[in-house]
Image (cartoon, helix red, strand yellow):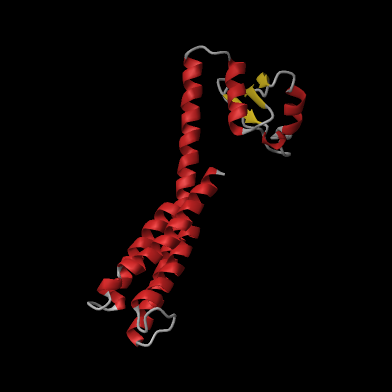
Amino acid sequence: MRRDNEVLVWIVTGGFGAMALGVLLIPLRALTSASNLAFVFLVFTIVVAELGGRSAGLVTAVVSAISLNFFLTEPYLTLTISKPDDVVAFVALAACGLIAAAFGKRRERWSERAGRAGKELDLVKGLVEKLTDGIPLDEILGDLRRAFGLRAVALRDARERILAAVPLGSTPEVEASIRRPGPPAPGRRRTPQPPHRSGLHLARSLGG
């Protein structure tokens, strides 16, 4: 919900900001062409797309093109365009704004992935610190289960024996939810696992 509110804020900011830019640039329309003024809208669209994501970038791009047409191209205060150069400026601004919005969506996905990776890394660091401090293993597995929204977590050794499981008494469910290694194919020998390794199995199929 917080992310949705942030996107909504940027959508409103982009829309009204593009209209405000059109009004602020009115004194300059007699000094330069609309194609030059379009760069101001393009920069604004890129900033909004980078900070607000794809939806905000799309709204800003569309409103920027309309604002350029309405306030800064002849005949003024209409949605018609009389000069071929202004038509080119309008189309170029709309196209570049949409491209910037598309890249804003990619950046948004990368930012979300980086945020999740950072949270998981912090979680791992916290688990290591708890292990170092001698906190009981059941408590550590419980924190791991709650952090990932799992119903059960089991820790096994190299021989598939359960060393610990949370919540307490969930061992049958964990046994049923984790795929057990099948028998080796005829003519093949199963590769033995090193005895010093242990495995942490997350019963994701049981997640609530």
Task: From this view, report whether residue 80 is shown above or below residue 5.
Answer: below
**Depth check, front residue: 112 or 134:** 112
Q: Position of residue 70 (x, y in %)?
A: 40, 76
Q: Position of residue 111 (x, y in %)?
A: 45, 47
Q: Residue shown at 55%/20% (left/top)?
A: 196
Task: From this view, report whether residue 140 is shown above or below residue 178.
Answer: above
Using the rendered image of the protein, determine whether residue 158 is visible from the camera's viewpoint.
no
Using the rendered image of the protein, determine whether residue 25 is visible from the camera's viewpoint.
yes
Q: Please state, as top left, top right, bottom left or bottom right, where the C terminus lies in the image.
A: top right
Q: Please state, as top left, top right, bottom left or bottom right, where the N terminus lies in the image.
A: top right
Question: Which quadrant of the view contains residue 32?
Answer: bottom left
Q: Position of residue 110 (x, y in %)?
A: 46, 49
Task: From this view, report whether residue 41 is shown above or below residue 88.
Answer: above
Asked if residue 60 lies left or right of residue 155, the reply is: left
Task: From this view, report whether residue 61 is shown above or below residue 176.
Answer: below
Q: Position of residue 109 (x, y in %)?
A: 49, 51
Q: Residue shown at 67%/35% (left/top)?
A: 204
Q: Residue shown at 39%/69% (left/top)?
A: 96
Asked if residue 13 lies left or right of residue 162, the reply is: left
**Depth check, front residue: 61 or 200:** 61
Question: Which quadrant of the view contains residue 100?
Answer: bottom left
Q: Residue shown at 51%/11% (left/top)?
A: 134
Please identify the residue farthest to the left as the structure is shown: 31
